[in-house]
Image: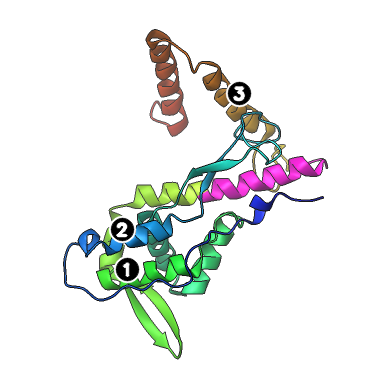
Amino acid sequence: MRHPQFLTAFARGPRRAQHKAHGHAHPHERDGRHAHHQRHASAGGDWFAGSPDGRGDPDGFGGDGRGWTRSRKVSADDLQLMLLGLLEKNPSHGYELIKALGALSNGFYTPSPGMVYPALTYLEELGYATVEQAGAKKRYHLAEPGRAHLDGNRERLTMMFNKFKHVARKMDWMRQAWSGQPRSTGPEGEDTATGWLPEFVAARQALKRALLERTEANPKEQRRIAAILARATDEITGVCS
């Protein structure tokens, strides 16, 4: 079976991008350098959406893969924060961080060295990371200012990592759907590859379809739907318990 190319999509960026030393201005105001890195970091590695046919897709999008389109790019700030999050777990070489992001998203987002190494250099210059030189290789460590930055952005980082985990599971679910083979299930009926129950996937699809069908809703109907979604959100997050 031929798999669509996006299953092994790699983010492309320039092979080399260098930062020159500057004075101690605000991190995001250093002679436009951050804006330059922002453009490179946004050059690839998009989140995905697609055509709303819902076939085999746990989010009600994508179908056979031909309708998938680019949706949300990984910004420089996102990439920097994720690199710090990975360094918090293990000091790493640049290529190890690239592989870790690829593994987290099941190969959907694997940033290029031209994106990762400038980001690491920038984090070092900010004092968020330190470098241990071992011959020609550099091993990066999380510094205390970087840990403080992480502590101030925990919720955002968790959400980004959860998105990657969702991408990985979604791709596993769709690969299985395209294979045409019966799913292997666990004791609760969950798909063994993703951990998702069929009724959980069906409920996600139904909600997305219902919202799409009410795209032209008037203000009164929009308020009614918003109230329903707010109650559902509270129940899901346990606010009402």
Mark positioned earlier in the residue sequence (3 or 1): 1
Q: CA distance from mark 2 to mark 1?
A: 15 Å
Disc 2 crowd rating (10 Å Cα; few below 14, some 14-19, many 20+) is some
Residue range (magenta)? 164-185
Q: CA distance from mark 3 to mark 2?
A: 40 Å
Q: Quadrant of residue 124?
A: bottom left
Residue at 23% over, 62% down: 27
- Which label sits on residue 123? 1
Does residue 225 lie above or below 189 as drawn? above
Does residue 210 lie above or below 183 as drawn? above
Mark positioned earlier in the residue sequence (3 or 2): 2
Identity, as a three-letter code, of the amino acid under mark 1: Leu
Q: Secondary structure at mark 2?
A: helix
Reading the image, the residue beneath label 2 is: 35
Does residue 24 lie above or below 70 as drawn? below
Q: Is residue 122 magenta?
A: no
Q: CA distance from mark 3 to mark 1?
A: 43 Å
Of residue 185 and residue 194, the one placed in the foreground of this image is 194
Identity, as a three-letter code, of the amino acid under mark 2: Ala
Q: Outermost residue toward the bottom?
A: 135
Disc 1 crowd rating (10 Å Cα; few below 14, some 14-19, many 20+) is many
Residue 164 location, x and y as percent? 52, 50
Q: Is residue 233 visible?
A: yes
Mark positioned earlier in the residue sequence (2 or 1): 2
Q: Is residue 185 visible?
A: no
Reading the image, the residue beneath label 3 is: 206
Residue at 29% over, 61% down: 34
